[in-house]
């Protein structure tokens, strides 16, 4: 993630469970019908908001650069629409089971055990959303009298998105609970939640005497439990924050929706849905296939040639989509069949796909890099510049593994194209090959913002697909718009939830304690960097890049600056390390995403990942020890 993207159950090869016959008790059919109509309505509204954002941002960008007449009101309106898109997208993601969550521990449960755990998770989700309704209403009411600076409309219009989104998510969670769980499962889960809530209420006076030890109970113990049972990461964060404020402080819960809004209102994050949409469009427009065909013509006849093509394609496509799921989904179907024909083992090629996703984590316009810039204040242009060479280092170490594994590969049947055929494929691929270059240089040179470049990229891709490749499939546009809203909502709700949780941690004094601990790490700066790398690998495996960086970036980046570490260097270490954790089994959900895209069982892949992971660890060590790799071109 980038986004990654993540890490929904569907991304790990699972589909949202459908209610079985025994669960279809009285009223379930009615709720199934309600769910269908609610889903259709919310998905249509979310898709319409994506289109509105593209039109608004595209029009504003054209007005600024073509007619030199900036639309002063565009940013304000775009932010309002963005909050609504984020919240409605979160509803779609919850309904479709596409929120970021950890499924490692529940994947092997029996059907009955899984149903019980899912019921408990939905009860917890419903509880925290129900608790937030009134505080969010108060938050909205407090903004009704305020007006936006340019448009002059009530700020309550923007903040109402939180109330509508939370209410719709609550309806969705209750609806799913009634459809998928039996009465006994619902009653049992509700009894557990009420009992635990009563115990926490009784122990409230005790928490006052624990100091920061109560952070372990709520922000480690409670979050860990929620994640183990497969509860969405964003809602796990919100639940822990609400519980901490309710049982250990006198701070009103209304601060939570305020922090959610703050976390999701950053204009920098507008680039997220635009790059997610761009990543999906390049596949249906033909750009990705054209680039891959050209690369195959150059390297496909060498030993390991298709593996090198995979690495190169990931490097290029990552510069367009910014999302790992889109990158892998665009490349794997085009290369895997031929790689299997050459005798490459499925485990090796899926492992390479997973490792290539790690290698390309720092390639702009990585969604995680954009998130780093939004929460830490580090220049996104500098991050985009600093991320290119570390990915090359990862590519070189992985290439060494490829060379060793394919040194005896039989390529006698590989097609060798002549210079004329290669030139033709190069000309066909030029519109795609030029897009990542334009994206990077436009942002790095300050010509346009990441959001503007992404919007231009979306419009450019549509035009190229329609008029150049003439293969743009309009029937797939609506599903892509809904997918964009869902993934964006899942990502941005995590950003908002982690922002609220990070605020609570800061208020507790935890940040000061963390500064003292990290500043006293043996080995000085190098010890701090080493421990940071290990910590981010662990965080990446359980939280992913976006929530981890939003949660810990504001805490750790000031420490790095205090110790004289370049912020870009530290950001690259953090992003590369989190990518390594995200794609490392058994906890890294990105690994299961790669297996799902490659249509190979994780059990068949896991024993093949270690050479590639070792190469990536070597690359990470080099990135940590040689700051120039990240900062040499700044």
Image (cartoon, rainbow, N blue to C red):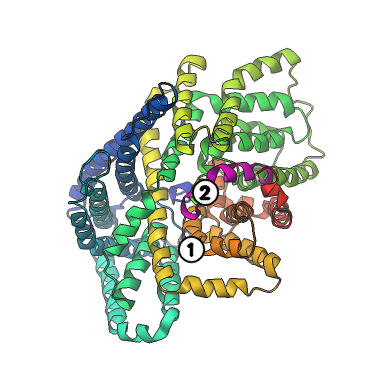
- The crowding category of the residue bearing disc 2, from other C-alpha atoms within 10 Å (few below 14, some 14 to 19, many at least 20), is many
Q: Which residue is mark 1?
A: 105
**Element under label 1?**
loop
> 442 above or below 139?
above
Instruction: Please give the name of the residue rendered at 39% of the width and 68% of the height, measured from the top-left corner.
Output: 504
Disc ID at residue 337: none
Q: Is residue 7 magenta?
A: no
Residues in magenta, as a range:
374-390
In the picture, the disc for residue 368 is 2
Q: Residue 565: x and y, percent?
A: 64, 59
Q: Nearer the viewer, residue 276 or 37?
A: 276
Tell me the CA gap for discs 1 and 2.
Answer: 26 Å
Q: Quadrant of residue 507?
A: bottom left
In the picture provided, is 169 more to the left or to the right than 534? Answer: left
Q: Does the segment drawn in magenta span residue 387? A: yes
Quadrant in which the C terminus is drawn: top right
Q: Secondary structure at mark 2?
A: helix
Residue 376 at x, y percent in the picture:
50, 55
Q: Main secondary structure of the magenta part?
A: helix
- Percent position of residue 38, x then y: 23, 43
Q: Residues within 10 Å of mark 1 (few under 14, many from 20)?
A: few
């Amino acid at each position: 993630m980038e986004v990654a993207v993540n890490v929904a159950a569907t991304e790990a090869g699972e589909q949202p469970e459908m209610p079985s016959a025994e669960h279809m008790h009285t009223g379930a059919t009615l709720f199934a019908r309600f769910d269908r109509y609610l889903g259709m309505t919310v998905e249509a509204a979310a898709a319409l908001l994506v289109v509105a954002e593209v039109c608004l941002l595209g029009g504003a960008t054209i007005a600024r650069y073509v007619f030199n007449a900036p639309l002063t009101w565009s940013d304000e309106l775009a932010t309002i629409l963005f909050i609504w898109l984020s919240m409605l997208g979160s509803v779609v993601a919850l309904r479709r089971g596409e929120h970021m969550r950890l499924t490692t521990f529940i994947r092997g449960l029996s059907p009955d055990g899984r149903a019980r755990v899912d019921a408990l998770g939905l009860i917890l989700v419903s509880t925290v959303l129900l608790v937030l309704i009134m505080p969010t209403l108060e938050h909205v009411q407090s903004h009704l009298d305020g007006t936006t600076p340019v448009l002059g409309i009530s700020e309550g219009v923007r903040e109402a998105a939180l109330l509508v989104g939370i209410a719709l998510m609550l309806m969705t969670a209750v609806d799913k609970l009634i459809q998928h769980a039996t009465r006994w499962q619902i009653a049992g889960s509700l009894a557990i939640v009420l009992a635990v809530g009563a115990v926490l209420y009784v122990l409230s006076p005790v928490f006052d005497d624990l100091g920061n030890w109560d952070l372990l109970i709520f922000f480690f113990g409670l979050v860990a439990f929620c994640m183990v049972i497969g509860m969405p990461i964003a809602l796990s964060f919100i639940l822990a924050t609400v519980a901490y404020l309710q049982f250990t402080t006198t701070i009103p819960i209304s601060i939570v929706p305020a922090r959610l809004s703050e976390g999701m209102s950053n204009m920098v994050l507008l680039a997220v849905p635009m790059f997610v949409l761009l990543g999906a469009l390049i596949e249906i427009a033909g750009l990705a296939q054209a680039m891959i065909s050209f690369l195959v013509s150059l390297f496909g006849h060498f030993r390991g040639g298709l593996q090198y093509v995979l690495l190169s394609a990931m490097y290029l496509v990552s510069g367009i989509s910014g999302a790992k799921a889109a990158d892998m989904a665009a490349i794997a179907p085009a290369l895997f069949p031929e790689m299997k024909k050459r005798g490459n083992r499925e485990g090796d090629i899926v492992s390479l796909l997973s490792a290539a996703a790690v290698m390309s984590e720092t390639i702009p316009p990585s969604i995680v890099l954009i998130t780093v810039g939004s929460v830490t204040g580090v220049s996104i242009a500098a991050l985009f510049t600093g991320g290119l060479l570390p990915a090359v280092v990862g590519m070189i170490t992985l290439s060494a593994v490829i060379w060793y594994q394919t040194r005896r590969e039989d390529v006698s049947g590989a097609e060798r194209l002549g210079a004329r055929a290669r030139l033709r494929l190069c000309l066909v691929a030029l519109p795609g090959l030029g897009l990542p270059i334009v994206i990077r240089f436009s942002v790095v040179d300050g010509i346009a913002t990441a959001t503007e470049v992404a919007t231009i990229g979306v419009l450019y891709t549509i035009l190229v697909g329609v008029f150049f490749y003439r293969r743009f499939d309009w029937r797939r546009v609506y599903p892509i718009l809904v997918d964009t809203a869902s993934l964006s909502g899942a990502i941005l709700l995590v950003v908002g939830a982690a922002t609220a949780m990070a605020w609570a941690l800061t208020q507790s004094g935890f940040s000061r304690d963390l500064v003292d601990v990290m500043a006293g790490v043996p080995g000085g700066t190098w010890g701090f960097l080493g421990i940071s790398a290990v910590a981010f690998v662990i965080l990446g495996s359980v939280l992913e890049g976006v929530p981890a960086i939003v949660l810990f970036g504001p805490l750790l980046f000031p420490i790095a600056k205090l110790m004289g570490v370049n912020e870009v260097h530290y950001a690259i270490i953090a992003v590369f390390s989190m990518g390594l954790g995200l794609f490392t089994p058994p906890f890294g959900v990105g690994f299961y995403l790669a297996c799902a895209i490659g249509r190979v069982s994780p059990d068949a892949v896991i024993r093949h990942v270690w050479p590639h992971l070792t190469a990536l660890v070597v690359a990470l060590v080099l990135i940590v020890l040689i700051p120039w790799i990240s900062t040499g071109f700044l």
